[in-house]
Amino acid sequence: MNTILVVDDEKAVCNLLKMYLEKEGFEVVTAHDGEEALKAFQHYHPALILLDLMLPKKDGWTVCREIRKTSTVPIIMLTARGEELDRVLGLELGADDYIPKPFSPREVVARVKAVLRRVQMQEEGRTKQ
């Protein structure tokens, strides 16, 4: 089963995404600040991370940067910061996608599935070589 790490300081956002993702068969772990996110990442080894940028303790930029030092896990940034500069910076730091708030939970689930499909196809391509 694919584990998704949802990181947002708004518990209502985490709960909403958790409900939609679990309905689609994903296991969901939540974190509400940057430090908790890094601990959860180390402990659960998620298949994908949904990451807010504006977090207490360590912001999403820092979390993304630290994860990218050791992992290529897919990261989708989910944030109220929707300016072009923020989106470009997020993608340059290693995010695989960027969804501005407010968002449609169904669209988030669809994007999660699309990114995981792409990763699975890449892994299958590597094992065939």
Image (spheres, rainbow, N blue to C red):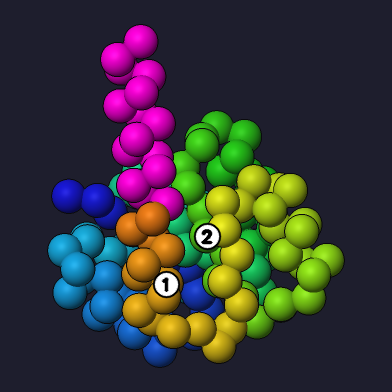
**Disc 1 vs disc 2: Cβ atoms closer than 8 Å?**
yes
Residue depicted at 19% across the width and 68% down the height: 24
Name the element at disc 1: helix
Q: Which residue is the site of mark 2?
A: 76
Q: Which residues are magenta?
A: 115-129
* Vertical side of 58 occupied by 13: above or below: below
Identify which residue, 84 or 72, lies in the foreground: 84
Residue depicted at 38% across the width and 81% down the height: 105
Name the element at disc 2: strand
Amino acid, disc 1: Val
Question: Which of the labelled discs sits on residue 108, or is there none?
Answer: 1
Residue depicted at 37% across the width and 19% down the height: 126
Horizontal side of residue 51 vs 81, given as left or right: left
The number of numbered discs placed on residues in the rendered structure image is 2
Q: Quadrant of residue 120?
A: top left
Amino acid, disc 2: Ile
Compare marks 1 and 2 and give the one earlier in the sequence.
Answer: 2
- The percent coordinates of residue 115 (x first, y second) are 42, 52
Residue 37 seen in this snapshot: no
| Residue 127 among magenta residues | yes
Q: Quadrant of residue 88?
A: bottom right
- The percent coordinates of residue 49 (x first, y second) are 45, 56
